[in-house]
Image: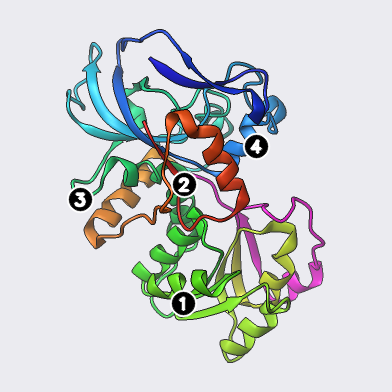
Amino acid sequence: MKAALVNPMGLDNLRIVDVPEVQPGAGQVLVALKAASLNYRDILAVEGGYGSMQKQESLIPLSDGAGEIIAVGEGVREWKVGDRVVGTFFPDWQAGPLRVEAVMTDLGGRMDGVAVEQRVFRADALVKIPDNMSFMEASTLPCAAATAWNAVIENGKVGPGMTVLTQGTGGVSLFALQFAVMAGAEVYATSSSDDKLARLKELGASHVVNYREDAEWGKTVMKMSRGRGIDHVVEIGGASTLKQSMRCSALGGMISMIGVVGGPKAELNVPIVAMQDMVIRGANAGSRVALKRMVAAMGHHGVKPVIDSKVFGLSELKDALVYLKSGQHIGKVCIEI
């Protein structure tokens, strides 16, 4: 069967190779993967950018994949052949708060990922796909959607009457926008072009700002909110945007730190954090239980992932990663397997 393999680390060393077929052992299932989606962290992983926190040789990349169970190992009762499933980002994180031992087995990082035709999963590391969701749509859920869900809903407790700000049109940002709208919040959104801003409004954003034309967009958003500010900012840019996010935050507001697209190090105005009772909190893909809650909510409310119009094949994975890095996409970049 075919798999994408990078060895040694580096995008130029990514190849499509033949690997041995596998069979599930006790407590495992074999999944024929149908689709996978890309995250910015996949670019870093392929380049070996996580250092000792990832495999540094012979890595099958990508964390997010969906498919159909084609074989069931001994002792498995939860699943049967033909079930449509999506894998969890952290197989060992079943429920509860963040623990070191729960996040030591992320797919496409410390463990081989899903850029492969068939893969064995632990039976307790999968979630059922809603009937109204395709394999490609479901493949977008384990990292980007789950991170947005944990930032906005699980940790942020966003609800009616609250204000939320999202940044850009990448996967996490659009999921955060959709979840905030689903929860009844008023959403402000930034992006770099009028076309992208129009798409954000189509998805439910009430107010949009072009950050390329308005470098001081934090002040602009504060004025747009009539001085109230934003209750919850989903921070994607990192160093390049944190200052503006802080400028538009409400008293007692929360900033969920997720991305570092604009750089990993930023100057922090500590007195503002203290005086405004501000919370700056990280967000990650979370547990299997949280993923189940998210999938159930999406199915119930009919929330559909936004997938970029440009879809790639497994053999085009290198091109897909380059395209993702270019920032031209709107929504999730996906590959068919």
Count neighbours of disc 1 (C-alpha within 10 A) and say few if under 14, some if 14 to 19, many if 20 or more.
some
> Which residue is the site of mark 1?
162
Between the residue at mark 1 and the residue at mark 4, the CA separation in whole angstroms equals 34 Å
Q: Nearer the viewer, mark 3 or mark 1?
A: 3
Is 298 one of the magenta-colored residues?
no
Left or right of 189, for residue 336: left
Q: CA distance from mark 3 to mark 2?
A: 20 Å
Task: Tell which tag, 2 or 1, sits nearer the viewer.
Answer: 2
Of the residues shown, which amino acid type is indicated by label 1?
Answer: Met
Q: Give the mark, 3 or 1, whose residue is nearer the N terminus.
A: 3
User: Residue under circle 3?
Assistant: 132
Q: Is residue 49 rendered to the left or right of residue 79?
A: right
Disc 3 residue crowd, few under 14, some 14–19, many 20+, Cα 10 Å: few
Q: Which residue is mark 4?
A: 44
The residues tagged by marks 4 and 3 sit, at their Cα atoms, a distance apart of 32 Å
User: Who comes first in sequence, dot 4 or dot 2?
Assistant: 4
Q: CA distance from mark 4 to mark 2?
A: 16 Å
Mark 1: secondary structure: loop
Which image quarter is the C terminus in?
Answer: top left
- Amino acid residing under circle 2: Val
Q: Which residue is mark 2?
A: 333
Secondary structure under the numbered disc 3 in the rendered image? loop
SS under mark 2: loop
Q: Are marks 4 and 2 in contact (CB under 8 Å)?
A: no
